Image (cartoon, rainbow, N blue to C red):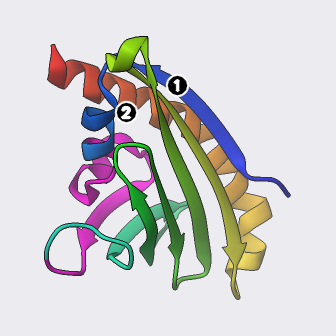
Amino acid sequence: MTAIREVIDVDCTPDEVYAYVTDPSHLPEWQLSAISAEQLDEGPLHAGSRVRVTRRIGNRQIPMTVQFDELDPPHSWDLHGIDGPVRPRTHGEIEPLDDGRRSRVTIDIDFEGHGLGKVLLPLVVRPQVRKELPRDEQLLKDRLERTTD
């Protein structure tokens, strides 16, 4: 199964997009399934930083921890789940448009299932993410463009 990919153009600079999208406190604002997100490590985000995210998957609230593997401001970020039944592997990329006045945001996400997660992935998680990711990116665009008006 290949990763789920969505792309959207945003009327903000790559720096603005990157700062917002990699700030865990903003996650519930633009991701429909995210109920809460809390950085577990002190200081600024860095490779190795962990974030506890509680998501609604189907009718359940499932906590999981993700860890940033790479942060390359304002170009890209990589993270992966380190616990929970459903562990995402996410790559985000921000490409400058119009001499850096706008941005193209690409998000690729795939999953690894553990225990109950192996059943949830094909039945609930992948269909939910395929439906939600385009809406999440639209929410991201709306939030970012509203804050810069």
Residue 85 drawn above or below residue 100: below
Residue 8 image offset from top left, x and y in percent: 52, 25
Closest to the observer, 98 or 142: 98
Could you say where residue 64 lies in the image, as x and y percent from the top left? 45, 77
* Circle 1 Cα neighbour tier, 10 Å, few/some/many (<14 / 14–19 / ≥20): some
Name the disc covering residue 88, or none.
none
Mark 2 in CB contact with mark 1 (< 8 angstroms): yes
Cα distance in 3D space between marks 2 and 1 = 9 Å
Q: Secondary structure at mark 1?
A: strand
Q: Is residue 13 magenta?
A: no
**Front-most of 80 and 126?**
80
Q: Quadrant of residue 86?
A: bottom right
In the image, is residue 75 above or below residue 111?
above
Residue ID for mark 2: 140
Q: Residues within 10 Å of mark 2 (few under 14, many from 20)?
A: many
Q: In the image, what residue occupies the spot 28% across and 59% down?
A: 24
The answer to whether residue 76 is seen in the rendering is yes
Tell me if 106 is positioned left or right of 55 in this view: right
Pointer 1 residue: 8
Q: Position of residue 83 (x, y in %)?
A: 52, 85
Q: Quadrant of the N terminus?
A: bottom right
Query: Where does the magenta region start and end?
Result: 20-42
Residue 58, picture quadrant: bottom right
